[in-house]
Amino acid sequence: MNVTNDSVPDAMLVSNTVAEIQTLARGFPQPLPAVQAVITIQVAFVAGTANAWRLIETTRSTVGRRRRMLCFDSLDQIQRSVDERLARPIHERGHLGVDGGG
């Protein structure tokens, strides 16, 4: 293969152009994947205990699973809490499945 002296400047030009493109690319923020979550709500009643009504909220997402339990004195309080969760904009709550418990 014959290499001419002209190929050295061409290689430098390509190298410099690639470096410029890389610098430009680093200037743009990389998009992060959207965290998609599924939230499941279960309602339970535990007889003979204080705050017998329980709301169990399980969030499953690409970053793992989180479970949280809230306790209430009455069915009305738990119903208000469920209604508040359902009233949240969809982008704040992900896909919400409501389960009657069990």
Image (tube, rainbow, N blue to C red):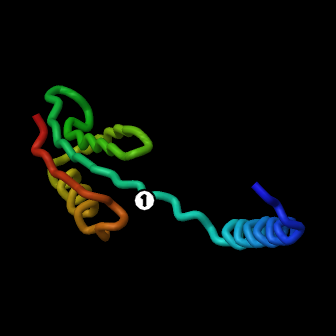
Q: Going 36% across and 64% down the picture, which residue do you hit?
A: 92
Name the quadrant containing residue 26. Answer: bottom right
Q: Quadrant of residue 66?
A: top left
Residue 101, x across and y down, in percent: 13, 39
Name the kind of residue labelled 1 in the image.
Ala
Point out the residue furthest to the right here: 5
Q: Position of residue 45 (x, y in %)?
A: 15, 35
Q: Nearer the viewer, residue 3 or 16?
A: 3
Residue 9: x %, y % from top left: 86, 71
Q: Residue at x 42, y 59 (%)?
A: 34
- Image position of 50 (left or right of 33): left
As rendered, which of 49 and 26 lies closer to the eye? 26
Q: Percent position (x, y) of residue 99? A: 13, 46
Q: Quadrant of the C terminus?
A: top left
Q: Residue at x 16, y 55 (%)?
A: 76
Left or right: 31 in relation to 59: right
Does residue 36 sit above or below 71 in this rendering? below
Q: Nearer the viewer, residue 70 or 88?
A: 88
Query: Callout 1: helix, strand or loop?
Result: loop
In the picture shown, does residue 23 fall above or below 81? below
The vertical placement of 82 against 73, above or below, is: below
The residue lying at 85 percent from left, 71 percent from top is: 6
Total marks placed: 1
In this picture, residue 70 sits left or right of residue 15 = left
Describe residue 18's horizontal placement relative to residue 82 as left or right: right
Q: Can you identify the residue that label 1 sits on?
A: 34
